[in-house]
Amino acid sequence: MAAGHFSIFAVEANVTAATSNYSLWRVLTLNGDDITSFWEMFLGITVWMVISYAFVYTVVALISMIMLRNHPWMFIYATSILGMAILGPATVGALTSASIALMFSSADKAISCWHCMMLGSVQTLAVMLSEFCSECGTVLPLPSAAPITITSIRNKLVYSSEKIYQKRVVDAKEGTLENPVVDKICDKCGHGTMSYTCRQTRSADEGQTVFYTCLKCNYNMVENA
């Protein structure tokens, strides 16, 4: 038995091999032969990248349409996401697929249809990780245009969503914390009342720094206790 070396790739391309029976259907069904040509690699990787890319962005667009169904910008937002499902693979996706195919073809390496699927899906995964934003839910205010209806067994209550949204904003503003007030003369205007905050900027066994703010002129003073 002849000794060989382990490799995750298929056998190196043979320049004397017969004409390839390559087809996109074989690539999609993962039933094709090993791919050696640059254009075959490029098409195989790109097709799987387009499928995974379009699937992810279509799902995101549908979810956004459901979540923003009462928002006036819902169609604009969903249309932009669906547009990226086409624009992404046609630009950056095609370039990255070509660079990957060029790398393997230049090294005379053959890849299988499974490699095409993994390489195409990994590109989509990389885009998802790079474009993920945890603050997307706080970018747009979402006051519902339609009234909110609460239905029980016998009664039906209808509330104006705009008033509920405004009430939520007012409650948030009224809940702002205020600093305590102490009798202390302001060095600038001579006012006798100032608010203060204490911040421990030293070790636990040392004094603390007190920050005073005049309630009349907003002059700031610092005192090391």
Image (tube, rainbow, N blue to C red):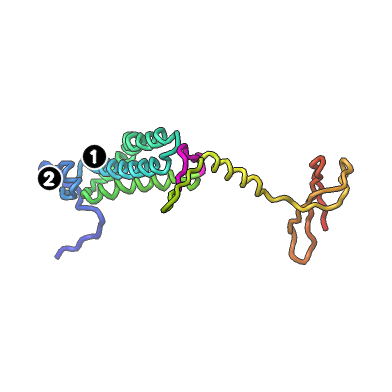
User: The magenta stretch spans which residues?
Assistant: 138-150
1 or 2: mark nearer the eye: 1
Q: Mark 2 points at which residue?
A: 17
Q: Mark 1: which amino acid?
A: Leu
The residue at the point 26 percent across, 48 percent down is 117
The residue at the point 23 percent across, 46 percent down is 108
Residue 154 position within the rendered picture, expressed as x and y whole percent measured from the top left: 43, 52
Q: How far apart are marks 1 and 2 (CA)?
A: 20 Å
The residue at the point 23 percent across, 39 percent down is 43
The quadrant holding residue 149 is: top left
Looking at the figure, which quarter contains the N terminus?
bottom left
How crowded pointer 2 is (Cα within 10 Å; few <14, some 14-19, many 20+) is rated as few
Label 2 element class? loop
Q: Is residue 158 left or right of residue 200?
A: left
- Residue 43 — which label? 1
Q: Nearer the viewer, residue 219 or 101?
A: 219
Q: Is residue 84 left or right of residue 39?
A: right
Q: Mark 2: which amino acid?
A: Ala
Q: Nearer the viewer, residue 225 or 21?
A: 225
Judge whether residue 148 is colored magenta. Answer: yes
Q: Which of 14 and 46 is in front in this view?
A: 46
Label 1 element class? helix
The residue at the point 62 percent across, 43 percent down is 170
- Say whether residue 174 is visible: yes
Report the predominant secondary structure element of the magenta stretch: loop
- Say whether residue 106 is visible: no
Residue 69 position within the rendered picture, expressed as x and y whole percent measured from the top left: 41, 39
Disc 1 to disc 2: CB gap under 8 Å: no
Residue 202 position within the rendered picture, expressed as x and y whole percent measured from the top left: 75, 60
How crowded pointer 1 is (Cα within 10 Å; few <14, some 14-19, many 20+) is rated as some
- Residue 130 — which label? none
